[in-house]
Amino acid sequence: MDSLGSLNVFIQAAETRSFTAAGRKLGVSSSAIGKAIARLEERLGVRLFHRSTRAITLTPDGACFLERCRRILCEIEAAEQELAQSRSAPRGTLRISAPLASMLMVPTLSAFMRAYPEIQLDVDFSDRLVDVIEEGFDVVIRAGEVSDSRLMSRVLGTFRLQLVASPQYLKKHGMPRKVDDLLHHACLHHRYATSGKLEPWPLRPGLKRGMSLPVTAVTSTIEPLIDMAEQGLGIACLPDFAVRRQLEQKRLVLVLDAHTRHAGTFRLLWPSSRHLSPKLRVFVDFMVEHLFPT
């Protein structure tokens, strides 16, 4: 920054041909201008001005240096203007990591793209636990608690897990009345992508000691489980947002709803920073407002 200040002093002196006039424009004394030019000449190892009692004129080296300095300051001014424009109009690419529950995410992401056409979304749908900073993501959408102190977070909304089955399945196999009845039913499970373990069903009370649920099918994403349940292949444990439409249309019904206890939270996470970029700020605000509308 000291060098840039020296360049500005040099340009003002060269254009006014006077240390006094340059000092007047910059709000300093003529002696301060003279000392700044002397330090610049000493650092560069060349003489930039011929000095006389009445005026100053550029040396050949000074004239060449002036053209370079003008180009440098013009580039800085252009960069400042670009940043100012980016603050007033959100634009650019936004790298996002989102869970594979696309039936929840995609409609809202599509609405965001229509609202902000100058922002390009680069979305990685994955249930793996990404490293937001190391992998260069601008923001991630995840369920669960935040354990990384390097990240800022904002709550998007809550969801709960529910047991569901098709009316056809329940007509054929009967409606479970208590938790242990599940031991005699086809159970469709979701496997965590990160750990490879089956997602536990939030049953209250739990199964009898030493007993575990039957495993009729296992998938790493929830969409196939929805289809299997609709096809009458068993009972699945799924988030409420994923089966809301199927429940409304009676293609699926709730099972043991009084015996399930669960509350989950979706959050936006992004690298800690004193200032949010315009594109990230509008994305965070939009998702909070639209993903889980009240």
Image (spheres, helix red, strand yellow):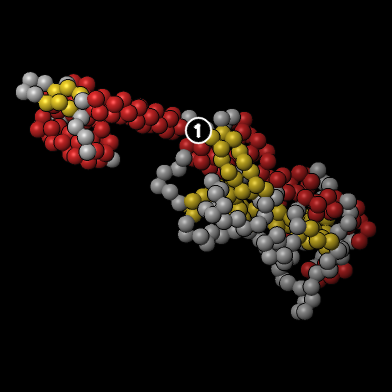
User: Which residue is drawn at the image coordinates 70% and 50% (left, top)?
Assistant: 100
Residue 294 visible in image:
no
Snapshot quadrant of residue 54? top left
Q: Mark 1 points at which residue?
A: 90
Which amino acid type is shown beneath numbered disc 1? Pro
Query: What SS does tag 1 mark?
Result: loop
- Closest to the observer, 20 or 250: 20
Left or right, 29 with reference to 250? left
Image spot of residue 181 (x, y percent): 84, 69
Q: Residue at coordinates 81% horizontally, 43% vertically from top-left?
A: 249
Residue 23: image location, x then y, percent? 14, 28
Task: Name the residue nearer the viewer: 291 or 276.
Answer: 276
> Does 147 sit above or below residue 9?
below
Image coordinates for residue 36, horizontal then vertical, percent: 17, 36
For residue 294, above or below residue 147: above
Would residue 201 be found to the left or right of residue 40 on screen?
right
Horizontal side, residue 91 vs residue 221: left or right: left
Q: Which residue is drawn at 67% across and 55% down?
A: 127
Where, by quadrant of the figure, is residue 7 drawn? top left
